[in-house]
Image: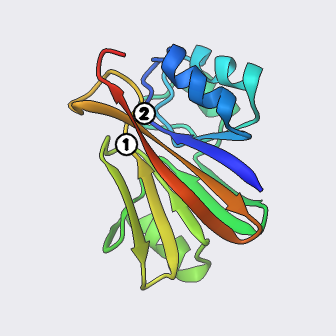
Amino acid sequence: MKKILLLSDTHSHIDDTIMKYVCLADEVWHAGDIGNLGVTDAIKKEKPLRAVYGNIDDASARQEFPLNNRFFCEGVDVLITHIGGYPGKYNPTVRQELALNPPKLFICGHSHILKVQYDNKYNLLHMNPGAAGTHGFQQVRTMLRFEIDNDKIQALEVIEIARKG
C-alpha cells in the first residue's frame, strides 16, 4: 500500500503546511505548473516525486519533467498531464489516448478547481487536486491524498489550506 499526496498549480509556492503533508505521504505527485524548481527540490528531499510540467513552467522544468507521465503504482495504471480537461470535456489529445488505452486513474491540473469524478465512458477515475499555490482565483488552496492498495484507490481526502497559509 502507498499513501499518495497529489498537488498541482503551486506556481512557485511551497510552505510548511504543504511540507507537513509531503512528509506524511509515501510518494508525492505534482500535476504541473510547478513554477520555481525549488518547489520540487524541496519535495524530492523528503519523498519520491512524480511530476509533469505545466503551461507556466520554463525550459528547466520541461527538461526535468515530462508533459505526460504514465506509470503503474501498485496495480493501478496512472496517467498524469497538466491540461487534460474532465469527463465529457477532455483535451483532444487526451481524449484520443483515453479512447485507445485508458488508465485506471487519470490526473490533471490547470483549472485550479478540485474535482474527482468517475468517468463511465472510459471506466477510469478522474482527479484534479485544484491549486496548492497562492497564485490564481481560488479562495482555498487544495490538495488530495489517498491510498493505493494493490489495484484499489481508497481513503480519498480533500486537504484545504487557507489562501494565505
Quarter of the C terminus within the rendering: top left
Most foreground residue, 153 or 36: 153
Residue 43 at x, y percent in the picture: 66, 24
Residue 143: which numbered mark, if any? none
State the image quarter where residue 155 is shown: bottom right
Residue 156 at x, y percent in the picture: 51, 55
**Residue at point 33%, 21% (across, down):** 134
Residue 2 at x, y percent in the picture: 74, 51
Tell me the SS state at disc 2.
loop
Most foreground residue, 96 or 34: 34
Residue 122 at x, y percent in the picture: 49, 82
Question: Rounded to the nearest whole Å, what is the CA distance between mark 2 and mark 1?
Answer: 7 Å
Determine whether 137 is above or below 94 in the image. above
Amino acid type of disc 1? Gly
Most foreground residue, 98 or 161: 161
Label 1 packing within 10 angstroms: few (<14), some (14-19), many (20+): many
Tell me the SS state at disc 1.
loop
**Residue at point 31%, 45% (across, down):** 111
Most foreground residue, 112 or 16: 16
**Residue at point 42%, 33% (across, down):** 9
Asked whether, in this view, residue 81 is left or right of residue 130, the answer is: right
Q: Earlier in the sequence, mark 2 or mark 1?
A: 2
**Residue at point 58%, 76% (across, down):** 102
Determine whether 121 is above or below 12 in the image. below
User: Farthest residue in the bottom direction?
Assistant: 121
Look at the numbered discs 2 and 1 and tell me whether their residues touch, using CB distance below 8 Å: yes
Q: Which residue is mark 1?
A: 130
Amino acid type of disc 2? Asp
Residue 9: which numbered mark, if any? 2
Q: How many marks?
A: 2
Quarter of the N terminus within the rendering: bottom right
